[in-house]
Amino acid sequence: MTIHFGLTPLLSLIAGIGILVFPRLLNYIVAFYLIIIGITGMTNL
């Protein structure tokens, strides 16, 4: 049984925990998440 962790689910988990612990950071977490997803999407073109 192999466990494969992708980048997107890991970032989602970290962002979700961060939002629960620090609700004020929601804007920053969402912004960084979207930037990272955009960069990784552009590098896979």
Image: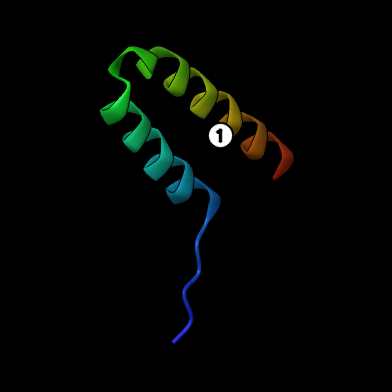
Residue farthest front in this picture? 21
Tell me residue 24's x, y (percent): 33, 12
Q: Residue at x 66, y 31 (%)?
A: 39
Instruction: Identify the residue at horizontal 49%, vertical 18% (top origin).
Output: 31
Q: Circle 1 sits on which residue?
A: 37
Residue at 30% x, 28% y: name it. Answer: 21
Q: Quadrant of residue 38?
A: top right
Q: Amino acid at mark 1?
A: Ile
Q: Position of residue 43 (x, y in %)?
A: 73, 39
Total label count?
1
| Residue at point 56%, 34% (across, down) | 37
44 horizontally vs 25: left or right: right
> Is 27 situated above or below 13?
above
Residue 30 at x, y = what percent?
Answer: 43, 22
Image coloring type: rainbow
Quadrant placement of the N terminus: bottom left
x and y percentages locating residue 8 in the rendered image: 49, 46
Closest to the observer, 28 or 8: 28
How crowded is the residue under tag 1: few (<14 C-alpha within 10 Å), some, or many (20+)? Answer: few
In the depicted structure, whether residue 29 falls above or below residue 4: above
Label 1: state its secondary structure: helix
Q: Is residue 32 left or right of residue 27?
A: right
Image position of 19 (left or right of 15): left
Left or right of residue 39: residue 26: left
Which image quarter is the C terminus in? top right
8 or 43: nearer the eye? 8
> 34 or 11, which lies in front?
11
